[in-house]
Image (cartoon, rainbow, N blue to C red):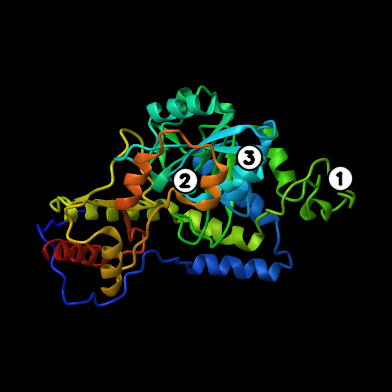
Amino acid sequence: MSVETPTEPRLAGALPARQIPFARTVIGPEARSAVQEVLESGWVTTGRQVLAFEAELAAHVRASRAVAVSSCTAGIELALRGLGLAPGSRVLMSTDTFCGAASAIAHAGLVPVLVDVDPVTALPTATHIRAAVRAAGGVSAMVVVHLGGHPVDVEAAADAAGLGLDRVIEDAAHALGAEVGPRRVGSISRATCFSFYATKNLAIGEGGMVTTDDEELADRLISLRLHGMSKDAWRRYLPGAGWRYDVAEDGLKANLTDVQAAVGRAQLRRFDADQARRAEVARRYDSQLAGLASISLPPRPPSGRHAWHLYAVRIRPDYPLGRDALIERLAQLGIGTSVHFIPLHRLTWHGRTSVLPPDGLPGADEVFDETLSLPCDQNLTDDDVDDVCAALWQIGRSR
C-alpha cells in the first residue's frame, strides 16, 4: 500500500469529523452467527468449540498444544504453578508492564523480582537482567513480557538470567502475531500466555490461551483451570464417560466457554488480515510523524515481526505540552489515547511486595514519564491516522 507523506498533515477543521477512540472492539457477522449456533446447541460452557479453538490457535503459533483459560493472567498463574517451584521462589519480570503478571506470580506463591528497562525500547537488556539477578541473589524462573507486541529475544533473556527455557513463561498478552527471528511467539519457551481481552489484537472480550510443547504440562493445565478436577463437565457427559472425578491438587475456576471460543475462532480466521492492517497503520504513523522531532517513534525489533498491539510514542521535553496535558488536549479533539503502563514499582502494592534493585529503576521511570499510546488497531481508517498525526503536528507547532 502506498502512503502519501505530507510534511505537516492538515487537520480538516477544529475537531475531527468523528470521535477516534483509542481502541474499538469489532465482532463481525461471522462471529455473531457462530455464537448463535452455540446458544442454540444446548451446550454453552467448555466443549467442542473450545477444543477446536485450542487446536487452531496451537497450529497458528506452531505449538504442540494450547489450553484455553479465562484470561492471560490466569494462564500465567497456572503455567507458573506447572513449573513446580518451591513456595517463595523468586521470579524475574519487567517493571514496565501491566500488573496482571505480577499478581499471577504472587498468587502462585512466588515473589516478583522487578528488572529495569532500556529507556529507548522499554524492554530489559541483558545487562539489566544480569544486574537484577545478582541483586536478588538469583531467580528460579522468569516471565518475559513482549511489551506492545515488540518481540523479545527470549533465549537471550533466559541466558542472561542464567535460566533454561524450561524456566521461562512468556507474557504474550500483546504479542499474538509477533515473531522472534523466524519463530512465532507461542512456540519458544516452556509456556506462552495470550490474552483475548477486548482491546487485544484477537479480541473476544475476555479470555486467554496457554501454548506449550510440553504435553504433561498441557494436561496438568487442563485440570488446574477447572478446580484441579480430573474430568471437566464435557468429558463427564460424553457417552460412556462416567460421572466420577477426582481432585488431586487445588486449581482455579479459569475455563473458557464455548460462546467465547466461537468468537475467538471467527476472529482467528481474519487475524492475518487484521495484523496486516495494523502494520499498515504503524507505517502510516511512521511516515506522518517522522519529521516531528519532539516525538520519538516506536523502535523496531532487530529481527522478527512486531505485533503492533500498541503504537507508543515518546513525548520529549521540547514538545510544547507535557504528556498528561497532551492527553487532555487530544481528548478535547475527540482523540483517545492511553499510557502503557504505570511501572509496577510505582504501584503501592507491587512496590511493597516485589524485590526491587537497590539503585532504583530509572529507565522505566523515564519511559513512563514520556510514553503515550496512540490509537492503533485494524479498524482505523487512513483518515483517522491522518487526523491524529495532524493534531500532533498542530499542537507541536503551537509554541
Instruction: Tell me if I can see residue 8 in this picture.
Output: yes
Give the amino acid at mark 1: Asp
Q: Position of residue 349 (x, y in %)?
A: 55, 51
Give 293 or 232, whichever is nearer the viewer: 293
- Label 2: element kind: helix
3 or 1: mark nearer the eye: 3
- Label 3: element kind: helix
Give the amino acid at mark 2: His
3 or 2: mark nearer the eye: 2
Instruction: Tell me if I can see residue 213 in this picture.
Output: no
Residue at mark 3: 79
Q: Name which of mark 3 and mark 1 comes first in the sequence.
A: 3
Residue at mark 2: 345
Q: Position of residue 64 (x, y in %)?
A: 59, 36
Residue at the location (67% across, 33% down)? Answer: 215
- Label 1: element kind: loop
Q: Quadrant of residue 118?
A: top left
